[in-house]
Image: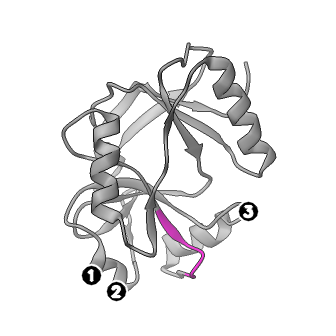
Amino acid sequence: MDDSNMMHGGDWHGEDLAGWLVGEKLHGCRVFWDGARLWTRGGCEVRIPQDWAEQLPRARLDGELWAGYGGFKTAMLATNYGRFTPAVRLMVFDVDAPGNFAERQETARRLVGGLDFAEVVAHAPCPSTAAAIERMRDVQAAGGEGLIARHPGNRYRPGRTGEILKLRTIR
């Protein structure tokens, strides 16, 4: 398993984001749950807590391990060495399933809803590019990294796509 099973976006270069769905870009460690095991982007298996393994669905979830603002080192220790603390959460932002992005978000919520260690990263429709920039600045002021914008018609396809854009700076 490696990142060829994951969907990846590119950097935002001023594209119009009106109508896109935006959510926070978390500063954690990218992972992929294949329905039985958790993998890093580089193809290493993550040693997860036994209760996670027992409770996660038998579905393919795309996300990252995140330990809150300023918690990158904690997330990295969990990812690389299996040192999980209560701060580490599986933040799901997509599921390898049929449907557009909003439909897959609903599928992801059904799959991980109720798990105390996992949640789906919320995305909301963006009325304009200016609104996305304002939200990105608010996220960064709170200690976050930026935003991810997803085209609403986006289908899950492993590999790089122009239908996912990372907003971290204004160009």
Q: Which residue is mark 2?
A: 50
- The image position of residue 86, as x and y in percent, is 56, 81
Q: Residue at x 32, y 53 (%)?
A: 108
CA gap, disc 1 to disc 3? Answer: 29 Å
Based on the displayed image, in which of its 4 quarters is residue 58 positioned? bottom left
Q: Which mark is residue 70?
A: 3
The residues colored magenta run: 85-90
Inspect the image, locate mark 3, and give the three-letter code of the amino acid beneath it.
Gly
**Does residue 81 sit above or below 91 in this rendering?**
below
Based on the displayed image, in which of its 4 quarters is residue 35 positioned? bottom left
Q: Which residue is mark 1?
A: 54
**Does residue 53 sit above or below 144 in this rendering?**
below
Q: Residue at x 68, y 19 (%)?
A: 130
**Farthest bottom residue?**
50
Q: Is residue 165 left or right of residue 114?
A: right
Q: Residue at x 33, y 28 (%)?
A: 154
**Does residue 71 sit above or below 92 in this rendering?**
below
Inspect the image, locate mark 1, and give the three-letter code of the amino acid beneath it.
Glu
* Marks 1 and 3, the one that precedes in the sequence: 1
- The image position of residue 152, as x and y in percent, is 38, 27
Q: Which mark is residue 160?
A: none
Q: Looking at the rendering, in which quadrant would you find the N terminus?
A: bottom left
- The image position of residue 145, as x and y in percent, is 68, 45
Principal SS element in the magenta part? Answer: loop
CA gap, disc 1 to disc 2? Answer: 6 Å
